[in-house]
Image (spheres, helix red, strand yellow):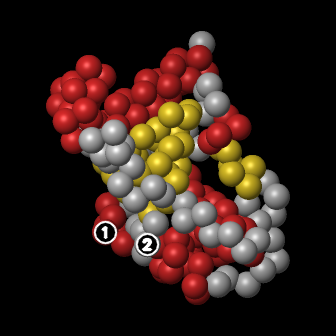
Amino acid sequence: MVAEASHKAGEKGVALAKQYLEGTTHIELPFDAYETPEQTTLIRLDGKRKAYDLAGHNITTRRPLYVEVKKYNVVGKQPVEYIEYLANAYSITARDVAEGLDRKREFMWITWHPFHQTKWSKLTSKSEIEDALSEYPECLNGEEISGGVVDLVAGRLWLLMLNNRQEDLFLTREELYRVQATLQRKGA
């Protein structure tokens, strides 16, 4: 029962994150790990697969976006999970670069509970990515850390914190459609 409740809470968090992000009118997230895992799964340097909760793109920049959602009401395992998230983002990007096709993927972490508060402003920094790789060296698959890839990843990370009260401010699906029609961000 606990696992099922946790799964439902996770799905609700993913749905809320999607509603919030799409409500910005800059992001479109048609894929989620529950319905379309093949679209939300990426491959690291070592060949391991990493599934993200949501996938889509930034409408204005056309860059692919992969979102990890943590709807926690406590810190939980976020500090450790976030470090792995950084290592995965590096490894996936390094694989793209090694294959000669930088897909310019961006990675977003959304949480409802803060963590690492004393270094919150540095959590997307180059030094945090390098520290994450020292914790998860398997993500390197025996390769040396590339400063150029670290720079790319640091510039493509997003870290957002939502609050239950903000949910009252989210656009409804109908409101979003009306706003999108007016803004014409999708080139319509």
Instruction: Report x, y in % for residue 163.
Output: 25, 38
* Location of residue 167 in the rendering, given as x and y in whole percent from the top left corner: 24, 29
Residue 126 vs 30, above or below: the answer is: below
x 82%, y 77%: residue: 142
Q: Is residue 183 left or right of residue 141?
A: left
- Alpha carbons under labels 1 and 2: distance apart: 14 Å
Do the residues bearing badges 1 and 2 touch, measured as CB atoms within 8 Å?
A: no
Q: Mark 1 vs mark 2: which is more N-terminal? A: 1
Q: Circle 1: is it few (<14), some (14-19), or many (20+) Cα within 10 Å?
A: few
Q: Which mark is residue 121?
A: 1
Which image quarter is the N terminus in?
top right
Q: Residue at x 50, y 80 (%)?
A: 151
Give the x, y percent position of residue 177. Answer: 28, 27
Q: Nearer the viewer, residue 97 or 145?
A: 97
131 above or below 148? Answer: above
Q: Amino acid at mark 2?
A: Gly
**Residue 121 vs residue 36, the one in the foreground:** 36
Residue on which the image places disc 2? 155
Within-10-Å neighbours for mark 2: few <14, some 14–19, many 20+: some
Q: Considering the image in quadrants, where does the C terminus appear?
A: top left
Where residue 185 sits, quadrant-wise, is: top left
Question: On the picture, is 33 further left or further right than 163?
Answer: right
The residue lying furthest to the top in this view is 1
Residue at position x 62%, y 42% in the image: 40
In this orientation, which residue lies closer to the viewer: 35 or 12? 35
Amino acid at the residue labelled 1 = Ser
Q: Nearer the viewer, residue 146 or 71?
A: 146
The dot on residue 77 is none
Q: Is residue 169 left or right of residue 127?
A: left
